Image: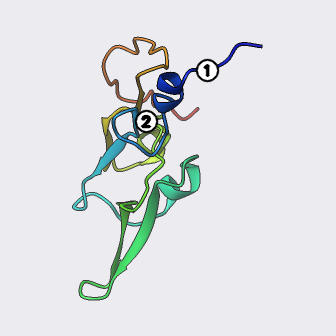
Amino acid sequence: MSKISLMERLRIPTYDNEKYAHTGSVKIDHTKCNGCGMCVTICPGKAIYIEWNEKDKTKKAKMETEFPQCMSCNDCAAMCERGAITVSTTYDFGYHFKILDRSGLKPPRKFKEKS
């Protein structure tokens, strides 16, 4: 069994430190959002929630601010019928983690309804 030196132990990455990893983020256009909640239902990281606005009497999707777990999967953008959601930043695990080149952000593929 190999031993880990003190310097190697100090450099072990943690997911809550932005130096080693950062999660993705989405932009939500509130003029297009109708608060249907489909994005909340499909989000595997529970990064989106629906907020009730008492002033306007409307529901709108919002991204978690405390500790969002957005994986930049684009599921929420694919489910949004109004096109209100776009992924703005992809997740990135750096330092000791090998990074695959995912190229740039691409819009999700929409499926056509069968007639």
Crowd rating for badge 2 (residues with CA inside 10 Å; few <14, some 14–19, many 20+) = many
Could you say which is closer to the camera, residue 29 or residue 46? 46
**Quadrant of the image for the C terminus?**
top right
Above or below 68: residue 91: above
In this rendering, does residue 111 appear at all?
Answer: no
Q: Could you tell me which residue is drawn at 49 percent across and 62 percent down? A: 37
Most distant residue in the bottom direction? 54
Q: Could you tell me which residue is drawn at 34 percent across and 50 percent down? A: 82
Crowd rating for badge 1 (residues with CA inside 10 Å; few <14, some 14–19, many 20+) = few
Above or below 79: residue 66: below
Helix, strand or loop under label 1: loop
What mark, if any, has residue 4 been given in the picture? Answer: 1
The location of residue 101, given as percent across then percent down, is 40, 11
Q: Which amino acid type corresponds to the residue marked 1 in the rendered image?
A: Ile
Query: Which comes before the other along the chain, label 2 or label 1?
Result: 1
The location of residue 1, given as percent across then percent down, is 78, 13
Q: Could you tell me which residue is drawn at 30 percent across and 19 percent down? A: 104
Could you say which is closer to the camera, residue 8 or residue 108? 8
